[in-house]
Amino acid sequence: MARKALPSNANKSSPPCLRRSSRIRAQQGSPLKPAHICPRDAKPLPDAMYKARIAGNAHGIRRKLKSIEGNQNVAIPAKKSSPLPDDNSTDAAVVDRPAKSVKRAVHFDTEPSPADRAQAVSVESLANHAAQPGYPKYDVYTIACTPEAEANLAAVEKCDSKGRRLLRYPLAFLLAYVYYMEDLFVYLKACGKDRYGEIGFTMAAFREMVKAAVGIREGYGLLEQVIRGRPLYMLVVSSSDRPETLPYPVARIGKLQELLTTKALPQIIPYQRVNKCL
């Protein structure tokens, strides 16, 4: 039996669509989004981790708050009574407390120099002491010195680091007239006691006059030194180991004042003798 022929328009129609779910149809209808674009409702990873950490430590935060509240309820211990007054009280000003930053140190007084010791004693005080009754009288031709001072000024024999024997002299204090040779020559020339107007003849004659008047000569009472290239003369009147015990020979000083045509008093000077090798 022959089949019935279908109409031409029926052959041209598409086959019926398969049944699909509404979810698949919704996905097919929406446009495709790139994979690297994050949706607007998605939040960054750090914020999500921070909230997760807070949610996990919520129990620990509650425990910390409870411990803080418990510490606030603890009573503060009372202050112990101190025998010292408070800083705010009126009695605190009476207490003399040293500053904490100040360091205490021990200071030792240094021994005064020989020049300071010589300046501490005045010649006028020695002259006043000599004016008292019972003061000893010294010879005009000898250097005045007390027996105690002579023993203290004696040389001491010692050995140096190389084994050499030396005579060491202690420090001495002298009562003497001190002049530079040039100044002394000008002074003698002004007084009319020069010789031929020359310094050599004048100083030689002066040495002879001093030797005849008070016994001062080279090696005994006449000391020569060179200070800054200038020769210096010292006419020794007396000597001692201490400046306050220097004798004041009135007659010897008077003779020198007549010879020098002056009323000036001698000076107190320290003098260190040179050590000698044996």
Image (spheres, helix red, strand yellow):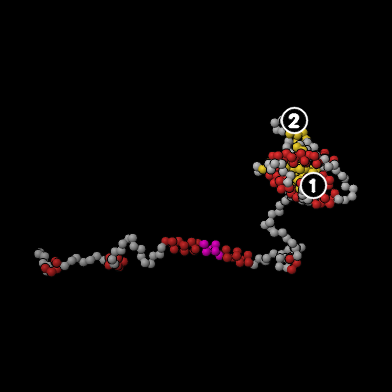
**In-image side of 17 versus 35 (left or right):** left
Nearer mark to the viewer, of 2 and 1: 1
Image quadrant of residue 10? bottom left
Residue 100 vertical placement versus 272 (above, below): below
Taking the spot 69% from the left edge, 54% from the top edge, the residue there is: 103
Which residue lies most toward the right here?
134
Q: Percent x, y for residue 61?
A: 54, 64
Main secondary structure type of the part rendered in magenta: helix
Stretch of the chain drawn in magenta: 57-62
Taking the spot 77% from the left edge, 49% from the top edge, the residue there is: 262
Which residue lies most toward the front here?
196
Q: Secondary structure at mark 1?
A: helix
Please name the residue that numbered disc 1 is placed on. 258
Residue type highlighted by circle 2:
Leu
Taking the spot 73% from the left edge, 63% from the top edge, the residue there is: 80
Image quadrant of residue 87? bottom right
